[in-house]
Amino acid sequence: MKSSNLLIFVALTIFLSGCGSGGGGGGGVGNLYGTVVNLSYNPVSNADVVVDNTATKTLSNGTYSFINLPSGQKIIRIISIAHTPSYRQVSFSGGQSVNAGIAILADLDSKVTPVSKAAGGTATNTSGSIKIVFPINSVTQETTNVVLTAVPKVAAPYNPPSGDQFVSYIVYAKPENMSLTPSAELSVPNLTGVPATLEVKFYNFNTDTLDWELLPTRGHSTTETDTIDINISKLGWIAAIMLITPAPGWIEGTVTSSSVPVAGVNVWTMTSYDVTDSSGSYRLNDIPVGTTEVYASALGYQLYTSPAQTITTNHPTTLPIDLTPFIQNQGNIEGSVKRLNDGNLQNARVVGSKGGVAYTDEYGRYTLYNVPTGITSITAYADNHISSTESVTVKVGETAIADTFYLPYVGQAATYEFTFETTTEGFTTIADEYGHNFWHRQTTSESHVNYFSQSHGAITQKVYLVGSTDIPPAHRGSYYFWYGQTSPDTSEASYIGIQAYDDTAEGSGGISSNAGGNYGTLESSSLDLRGYTFGKLSFWTWWEIEGKNPATGKDSMCVYISKSPFGSWDLLGCLNPYEDPAKALTISGEAYTSGGFDQQGIWVQHSFDLSQYAGKIIKLRFEFDTDDFLYNGFRGWFLDDIKIENSQMGIFGFGNYRRERPIPVPRKR
């Protein structure tokens, strides 16, 4: 008789399907790219992706890329404020481009439970199937917002130890890696009726080593049909391995679309998953007796959800699955690119305004495939040539012939690097309407400790910072730009302006006396991108802003671009998260930093694609805006080592920030 293991994870995590890696070791640099989706295979936009100390964000299509990473073994960490995190390990040698595959993230549970350090409390998920009882002084903060999420096995971070006759059920407990002293009691559903006399193994997922570690204690069921309880000393990923009794069944079948088998489809239940082979076949093993729904998803298809399937012991349940594709009306565009008065241009880049990128062959010819129908514009770029744009009408299933591009030669394109070591290098600051002008060139040799991170006599502590409370040193050298104050002493190393007289509550986050808060702009001089084929802006940054509402236009850190004659400004993107913490996960005095929520800030590199501005003369703006008077007692925004170059962003050639996020409206200058 076969049994199956049932795992219960009490920590949010994700299993990345389709993991790929190149060969290991070797010197030099290489490229890394991948895709992030949710369980419905919809792209997850604006997720933070970190490798070493380099960070980027996923685009609106869920993709991300890193260019010129040092070779070797790398851990990829993917964090989305509305989803479970993901971890992936890859290795590559110099010169390789490695596909890290598709990371699948589960949505966080919508229920948030505040737990008091002084009084303890009980946290549950929305359905009540998972529960943690916290004793007094168990959590480390005065108030900790706990989120418990049940996660299907397909979205787990590596499979935990298991075997035949056991199944796995997954949950994520946030905040991840928080230590609990004294320990708390976790209860998970006893899905297979494990008797009270049988111990259940629990594992914790170590996010540093990416290993499942056996917990020293064992869990026991309260009754054979109720829950399994265990004392835990840390939140995060936890797996309970449960014996299936009676013997499980299984589900098998074939996935097709319009009668054609579909390979590479993820098929899953809460406790089992499989990926279809070349014939579209799948098998979900170790399914407990009872009823369950089956899900299937793949890129290009709508999410499939089955009716409830009845599982009987030692018997198969056959379920054929028919996927519905997403349908688009599309056509193609063909044409050629030539140097003005001097023959064909090879390796010119042609970009469609509705999507699609192509490169010319040795005869200067190109084809853009699967372009949406209607009128679209296409632009041709070539190194050291002026770009050109024209309009084309695309019809369903047809190939449109575009007019030939003739590009003038203009000479070697410039590269711009700004280190601020000797001067401001053409950057100027613009004050807000209230006279605040907090952008300034700062030196590492000066120490400025955040005033609000400690109490001053009768004045209580306003912010809770992790690690040092001084401003950070420059990323490189001794100088950088900082949006923050060095005086007066009562607001040092913050952007509060003047503190409100009635800001008396501990942990308030710091309240400004000016109801409109403050904002300021750091603007570059004119930068000539004529002769650029692509265009990439990169910079190193360190920030610490409010953790309460960092995505809803509060403490926004946004980058804008304008092209000559500089009449309007386009948003390149913002460093803020795309969504605020669910139901205010953080308390007023906690920070969102370049290291994460309630984490120590770190220097990270961000980049934006300037390809659509290739061939133009541009200016850049870095704008910080508190938007209001609340939670302004943090250290602010730091910039260093800004670079603009005629370089491609990466595999996908887009950029590191979604352009479809809600656009902040700059205040009038």
Image: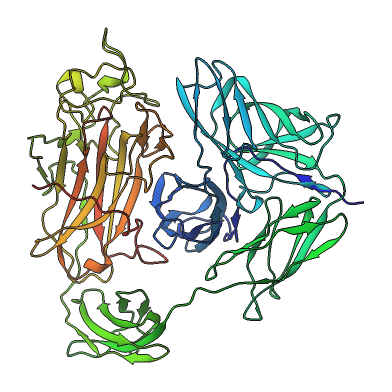
Q: Note whether 344 is above or below 489 in the view shown.
A: below
Across and down, in percent, residue 662 comes to: 29, 53
Tell me the colour scheme of the image. Answer: rainbow
Q: Note whether 394 is above or below 240 in the view shown.
A: below
Across and down, in percent, residue 44 comes to: 46, 56
Q: Which residue appears at 35% of the width and 64% of the height? A: 654
Q: Give whichever of 379, 325 is nearer the camera.
A: 325
Confirm whether residue 631 shows in the render: yes
Q: Which of the 4 image quadrants contains residue 368?
A: bottom left
- What is the number of callouts on the image? 0
Q: Which of the 4 image quadrants contains residue 237?
A: top right
Q: Give whichever of 311, 414 is nearer the camera.
A: 311
Q: Which residue appears at 20% of the width and 22% of the height? A: 491
Q: Tell me: 479 left or right of 668.
A: right
Across and down, in percent, residue 413 comes to: 20, 68
Q: Tell me: 600 left or right of 533.
A: right
Q: Which residue appears at 21% of the width and 35% of the height? A: 628
Confirm whether residue 364 shows in the render: no
Q: Which residue lies furthest to the top in this view?
A: 457
Q: Tell me: 321 left or right of 311.
A: left
Across and down, in percent, residue 188 comes to: 69, 35
Q: Give whichever of 116, 261 is nearer the camera.
A: 116
Q: Tell me: 591 left or right of 304.
A: left
